[in-house]
Each structure stands twice: as structure tokens, then as C-alpha cells.
């Protein structure tokens, strides 16, 4: 009888070594590249205007790309190396976790457009991520596929650096420019470009600027030529502003840089004029004429800001829709998505003195990037005191975020109703919610008006006003039409809102105001400057000088994909007038701090609110602590009074009492599962220390208490 064969001894598992460590790191690098790096770099590669607007250098862009692709995998490699030093089991556990975690986010993206509930997307994503990691440990076939994926980081980098639209920034054409010679020109020129300001936003009737809201624009109207039917060529700042500065309307994929658009007002005056330029979103002024920020310590600041903002962009790309929508909007600005350290939320626990920008205010020569009141003031005060001076300032006003009162003091915002539209797309609320945003935008326009007055004052003090050519315009407007009409996109229904920015030109020596109904365009500004100064342009712009006859031209706006939307000037004017009527009905025709649905209630006594309000109908303040101990000059002004209502129908009229008087009115609107309201009050109604805020349902002049602090 044969002896029973002894069982085979179990195979000794191969201990992970350097080869296994590096191979695993390659798998992680490939998985990271396709999950996180590729979506972000693909988006940025399609939108290089993002880098231009932020003033990022070639070095910034390359550091971002290589850092995004290489640094996280290197960090994971270091962690796994430490884990391997501890034990094989720890290494395997760490590697399993990394693979499962990255794969989870990859599977989130596969479910983006399924319409599934957020919780289900998370459960499915986590489950598939863990299953993928388990299969990778067990399947030789899957490991072989992952070996191929090791090349993904190189492919992602090559595609971004060499084949995306960002290639034109990484390998720019020569910045050599041909300067025109105009030695006889000796008229100072001041060009002011506001952002997201429509002509209808300055008016409460169809004839004049509203002097009660905007006294400085009204004064400008009386001493300049107002081209009332002005139209822009684009709703997108990187396309619209270059048209103002060049007089040309390039193809939609042209970058807003001097390399792509070498002919401009800068090259026509650069040989003979002293420049004072604030060009924060575009780079039409050549670097040889407008030096940009130097590398070094400022590069570190730029990279920190870039990283701070891109984490929100990345989050919107890789998170499930329900979670991504909770992140700050990234579609209406180029920077400051999460505040970048600036507290605008009104959080009572935040540092009260950290809401001002930290950017330098050095704009006497070269390119500025101002976005704060102190910086605007510094720039205006340093306008060159010379007849051969060219001042150009593009102000980020009254563009969102809406956060300034008419004096440029920052007030609190409300996280719950801060973003009431889908980026630049349709409004997400009804007419009452749109009205809340419109009142805020008009208030910030009041600050733009204050700056117009400061510019005029500075020029008068320097003895330049009478002799100067002063141009005040904007890149495009904004629509508060609602009912599915986009807030700020090319749309035939909104041309009277978006395509009709103001244009005021005070010609040298002009004393009296003139209203011109010529069908002017932003492209006509450079030819008009040239005609006034007697310049010999070394190129042929598309626009025409407004001093002479202007041909009949349709209003044409190009979107970011090159589609052209066109209406007649008459259609644009009708839409503009309809927008004015709509605004008057929503928020009245009074001064800034009366804006709201019931201005007739302002100033009435605010009766006491009982300690216990019946639960059938009540209103609750957001951020009650804002009003408990207000310190003027340190705290954000708590003038945007917001809250929610319960037990009241949508559209209920809410009256806001401040320290015993009615100071604001608003109507409730539904947003994200609750009924909200928001009213701006005159900051003069607030006092240092505790402020009493009462809320009422208003029916005529009958005030029913709903709550308060």
C-alpha cells in the first residue's frame, strides 16, 4: 500500500519590493491622471482665457500642469514607501485604499448625467471603486491593462502643452509690436470700461439717466455725447473688451492677448504717450508697454490663488451633481471662487479685518489687477498729469459678486441665496428672486457711479478735464428678464439687456450734453479716438469714427462657440425699454436705498414683535449674530437682511424693520427647498452695537409681526 502523498506546501507569497512599489505607483499615477488631471487640464486647455484674465505666466501654467499630474502620485508613492517599511500588510492596505478612492471618483464621473439621486451615485461609486481595487489585486488581465495606463500622465501632459488652446500661451508668438508715430497728438485720453453694465440699468424712463440713483452718470450725460444705442460684439469679457481696445472683431477662438491681437490703441499711442493702465482680464497692451508682474514672490501668490480656486473647479468636475452644486459658482468670474481668504459670508466667527484684498495698489505704470475700492482709488489718484497721457481702466463693476454699497463699503452676503442663477445661464428663481438680485446689482452700480465722480474730480484737480477726451463705457450688460432667458448669454430675447452697454464720450472742450442715436458699436471707440487726436493708424480697424456718418448695422453678438446672434437696433431698443418698465414694476423708481416692491412703506414705524409668534406663519432671520454687536469700520455692513419664511405663500410681501422704522421690503421666493427673502437697507439706518431687526407680513400698510431678533 502506497503511503498517502503529503499535501503540497502553500506557495510563499512574493514580498513586495522596489519593482512592485514602482509598478503600483505607476498604476496610481495613471489612474490619477485620467480621473483628476485630465478633466481639469482639458477644461483649462479649452479655456485659456482663464489664465489670461488672472495674469498667469507661462511658468505658472507649466507648474500647474506638471504639478497636477506628477505631485499627487509622488506623494502617494512616498506614503506607500513608508507603509512598506512598516510591513507588507500595511503597504497592501494603503495601496488598496488609494486605488479604491481614486476609482470611486472616476465612477462618480461616469454617473454624472444619469439623473440618479446623489446618495445612490455615492453608494454605486464607492462600491465600484472597492470592487475595482479588489479586482486589480486578483486579476492579471486588469493588472496588464493598468500597466498600459502608466503612460497616461505623459499623454495628458502632451495633450495639454502641445495640442490644447493653452499652447498659444505656453509657446506665444513674439510680442514684438509695430508702434505708430503720432508726435503731434497732445490730448489726454481717459478710457473707463465697466463690466456687466447695461444702458437700461442707468435709467428709470426711456429718455435720461436717473439722477437720483446715479448723479455722476447724470452729470456726465449733461457734459458729453451719449451714444444711447451702443452695442457690443460679445457677452464674454475676454471677447468684448478687446473689441473696445482694438476696433476689431476677431474670430471667437482668438485669445485676448497682444500676441493674438497685435493692433490696438496701445500700439498707436505707445511711442508718444505715457500709459496708466489697469487691464485685469485681458492682455491687449503689449508687455513692452505695460510690464506685467515679475516672477518670484508674486508668482507664489498667484499659484496659491490658482490652487485655491481650482479646487472648486475640480470639485465641480469630479463630484456627484448634488455635491458639486453646493460648491461656489465658478462660471461668473475668473478668480476668488471661494473668497480666497476674504470673508464675505458674514460669519460672526470670522476675523473681522480680513475681508480686504491683499493685492498691491501699484498702478502708476504698467498693468494693474485691481478689484477692490482702495485699489481703484489709488489708480484714479495717480492719473498722469500730462497732455500726453493715456489712462485706461477696466473696473470689475458692477459685475458679480454684488457686495458693495454706493460708497464702496463692503456689506454682508448670504450663502443661502448668493447664487440665484445657473452661472451665466437661466435664473433659478421666480420674478421675486430675480428682483432681489437686481436691487443688489443696482446698488453696486451706485458705487460705479461714485467712481465716475472721483474720476471727474481727479481730472478737474489736475487741470485735465476740459482738454481731455473722456470715454465711459462697458463691455456688456446683464439680463434680469427671467422666465428662462439667460442672465448673461447671447440670446435674441435679451439683446436690449446684454448687448447695449452705455457709451459716453466727452470730447475735448465739450460743455453741453448731446444724445446721439447713431448705431454705434464698441468697435468704433478706437477709430473715434484716432479721429479726435488726429492719429495716423498703421492698421485698418473694422469700426468707424463716430464724428462722421455711421452706417446702419445690425446688433450682432458672438458666443464663445462662434455662433452669431443678431437683431436690429430697433429690436434692441424695444427690449431695453421693456427691461426698464420691468424693473420699475419690480423695485420702483426711487433712489438706491428705496429699491423694493413696496417703497411706500419705508419710514413707517415698525411695531414691536411679540416674543412668541404663532407657528402658523413666521419668518426667521439668517445670521442673527450679525446684528448683535456691529462695529462700523471693522465688520461688514449688515445691510443685506435675509431669511426664510414658513407658513406663508410664495410672493408674500415682507417688510423689514430696523431700529423701529421700516427700512426695506421684499417678496418671498422659493429656492432649494425653502422660501427665502432678501432686502437691502440704507446703511445709515444701522448703528454701532446691537440693532433691532423686525420682520412683518405687509398687506397694504397693515404689518403683521412674523419674527426678528
Image (cartoon, rainbow, N blue to C red):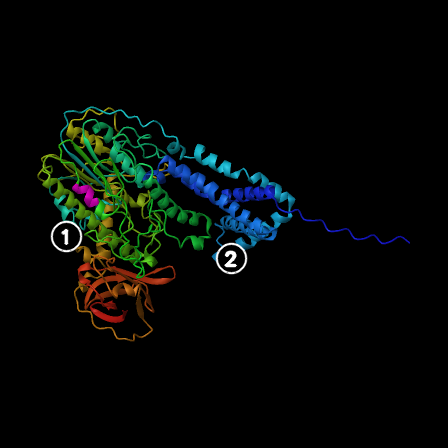
Residue 409 shows in the view:
yes
Residue 555 shows in the view:
no
Question: Which stretch did the figure color magenta?
Answer: 376-381
Q: Quadrant of the C terminus?
A: bottom left
Q: Dot 1: within a 10 Å radius of its alpha carbon, few (fewer than 14), some, or many (20 or more) residues?
A: few
Residue with the most extreme front position: 85
Q: Quadrant of the N terminus?
A: bottom right
Q: Is residue 26 magenta?
A: no
Mark toward the start of the polypeptide (2 vs 1)? 2
Quadrant hosting residue 565: top left
Q: Name the residue beneath numbered marker 1.
A: 212
On the image, the x and y values in percent for residue 699 come to 24, 68
Magenta highlight: main SS: helix
Report the disc number at residue 120.
Answer: 2
On the image, the x and y values in percent for residue 551 come to 22, 31
Report the disc number at residue 580.
Answer: none
Which residue is nearer to you in this view: 375 or 10? 10
Q: Nearer the viewer, mark 2 or mark 1?
A: 2
Please tell me whether mark 2 sits on a helix, a strand or a loop. helix
Which residue is nearer to you in this view: 573 or 244? 244
On the image, the x and y values in percent for residue 451 come to 18, 46
Going by the image, does 610 lie left or right of 515? right
Which residue is nearer to you in this view: 205 or 264? 264
On the image, the x and y values in percent for residue 550 come to 20, 32
Asked if residue 101 is positioned above or below residue 281 in the image, the reply reads below
Asked if residue 158 is positioned above or below residue 210 in the image, the reply reads above
Amino acid at each position: 500500500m502506497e503511503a498517502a502523498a503529503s499535501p503540497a506546501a502553500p506557495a510563499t507569497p512574493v514580498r513586495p519590493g522596489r519593482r512592485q512599489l514602482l509598478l503600483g505607483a505607476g498604476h496610481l499615477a495613471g489612474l490619477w491622471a485620467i480621473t483628476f488631471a485630465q478633466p481639469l487640464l482639458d477644461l483649462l486647455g479649452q479655456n485659456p482665457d482663464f489664465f489670461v484674465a488672472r495674469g498667469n505666466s507661462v511658468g505658472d501654467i507649466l507648474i500647474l500642469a506638471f504639478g497636477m499630474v506628477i505631485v499627487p502620485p509622488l506623494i502617494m508613492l512616498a506614503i506607500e514607501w513608508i507603509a512598506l517599511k512598516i510591513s507588507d500588510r500595511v503597504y497592501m492596505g494603503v495601496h488598496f485604499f488609494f486605488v479604491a478612492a481614486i476609482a470611486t471618483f472616476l465612477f462618480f464621473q461616469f454617473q454624472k448625467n444619469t439623473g440618479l439621486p446623489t446618495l445612490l451615485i455615492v453608494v454605486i461609486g464607492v462600491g465600484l471603486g472597492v470592487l475595482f481595487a479588489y479586482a486589480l489585486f486578483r486579476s492579471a488581465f486588469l493588472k496588464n491593462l493598468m500597466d498600459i495606463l502608466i503612460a497616461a500622465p505623459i499623454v495628458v501632459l502632451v495633450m495639454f502643452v502641445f495640442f490644447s488652446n493653452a499652447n498659444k500661451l505656453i509657446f506665444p508668438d513674439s510680442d514684438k509690436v509695430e508702434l505708430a508715430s503720432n508726435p503731434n497728438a497732445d490730448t489726454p485720453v481717459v478710457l473707463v470700461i465697466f463690466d456687466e453694465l447695461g444702458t437700461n440699468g442707468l435709467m428709470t424712463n426711456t429718455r435720461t439717466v436717473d439722477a437720483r440713483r446715479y448723479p455722476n452718470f447724470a452729470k456726465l450725460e449733461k457734459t458729453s455725447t451719449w451714444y444711447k444705442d451702443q452695442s457690443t460684439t460679445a457677452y464674454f469679457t475676454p471677447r468684448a473688451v478687446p473689441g473696445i481696445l482694438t476696433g476689431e472683431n476677431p474670430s471667437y477662438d482668438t485669445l485676448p492677448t497682444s500676441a493674438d491681437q497685435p493692433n490696438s490703441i496701445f500700439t498707436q499711442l505707445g511711442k508718444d504717450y505715457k500709459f496708466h493702465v489697469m487691464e485685469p482680464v485681458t492682455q491687449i497692451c503689449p508687455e513692452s508697454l505695460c510690464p506685467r508682474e515679475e516672477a518670484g514672490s508674486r508668482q507664489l501668490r498667484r499659484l496659491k490663488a490658482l490652487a485655491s480656486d481650482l479646487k472648486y473647479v475640480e470639485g465641480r468636475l469630479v463630484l456627484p451633481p448634488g455635491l458639486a452644486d453646493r460648491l461656489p459658482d465658478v462660471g461668473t468670474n475668473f478668480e476668488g471662487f471661494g473668497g480666497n481668504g476674504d470673508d464675505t459670508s458674514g460669519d460672526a466667527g470670522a476675523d473681522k479685518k480680513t475681508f480686504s484684498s491683499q493685492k498691491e495698489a501699484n498702478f502708476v505704470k504698467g498693468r494693474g489687477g485691481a478689484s477692490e475700492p482702495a485699489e481703484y482709488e489709488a489708480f484714479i489718484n495717480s492719473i498722469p498729469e500730462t497732455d500726453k497721457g493715456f489712462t485706461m481702466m477696466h473696473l470689475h463693476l458692477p459685475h458679480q459678486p454684488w457686495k458693495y454699497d454706493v460708497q464702496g463699503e463692503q456689506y454682508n452676503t448670504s450663502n443661502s441665496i448668493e447664487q440665484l442663477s445657473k452661472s451665466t445661464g437661466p435664473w433659478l428663481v421666480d420674478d421675486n428672486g430675480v428682483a432681489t438680485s437686481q436691487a443688489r446689482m443696482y446698488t453696486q452700480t451706485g458705487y460705479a457711479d461714485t467712481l465716475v465722480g472721483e474720476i471727474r474730480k481727479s481730472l478737474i484737480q489736475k487741470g485735465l478735464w476740459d482738454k481731455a477726451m473722456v470715454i465711459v463705457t462697458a463691455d456688456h450688460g446683464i439680463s434680469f428678464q427671467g422666465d428662462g432667458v439667460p442672465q448673461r448669454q447671447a440670446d435674441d430675447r435679451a439683446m436690449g439687456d446684454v448687448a447695449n452697454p452705455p457709451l459716453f464720450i466727452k470730447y475735448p472742450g465739450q460743455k453741453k450734453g448731446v444724445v446721439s442715436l447713431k448705431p454705434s458699436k464698441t468697435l468704433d471707440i478706437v477709430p473715434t479716438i484716432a479721429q479726435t487726436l488726429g492719429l495716423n493708424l498703421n492698421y485698418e480697424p473694422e469700426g468707424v469714427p463716430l464724428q462722421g456718418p455711421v452706417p446702419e448695422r445690425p446688433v450682432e453678438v458672438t458666443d464663445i462657440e462662434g455662433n452669431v446672434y443678431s437683431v436690429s437696433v430697433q429690436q434692441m431698443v424695444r427690449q431695453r425699454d421693456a427691461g426698464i418698465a420691468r424693473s420699475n414694476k419690480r423695485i420702483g423708481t426711487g433712489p438706491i436705498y428705496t429699491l423694493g416692491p413696496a417703497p411706500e412703506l419705508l419710514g413707517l414705524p415698525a411695531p414691536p414683535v411679540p416674543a412668541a409668534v404663532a407657528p402658523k406663519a413666521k419668518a426667521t432671520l439668517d445670521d442673527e449674530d450679525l446684528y448683535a454687536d456691529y462695529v462700523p469700520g471693522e465688520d461688514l455692513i449688515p445691510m443685506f437682511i435675509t431669511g426664510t419664511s414658513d407658513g406663508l405663500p410664495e410672493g408674500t410681501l415682507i417688510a423689514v424693520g430696523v431700529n423701529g422704522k421700516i427700512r426695506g421690503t421684499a417678496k418671498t421666493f422659493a429656492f432649494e427647498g425653502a422660501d427665502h427673502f432678501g432686502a437691502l437697507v440704507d446703511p445709515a439706518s444701522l448703528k454701532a452695537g446691537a440693532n433691532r431687526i423686525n420682520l412683518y407680513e405687509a398687506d397694504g400698510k397693515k404689518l403683521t409681526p412674523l419674527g426678528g431678533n
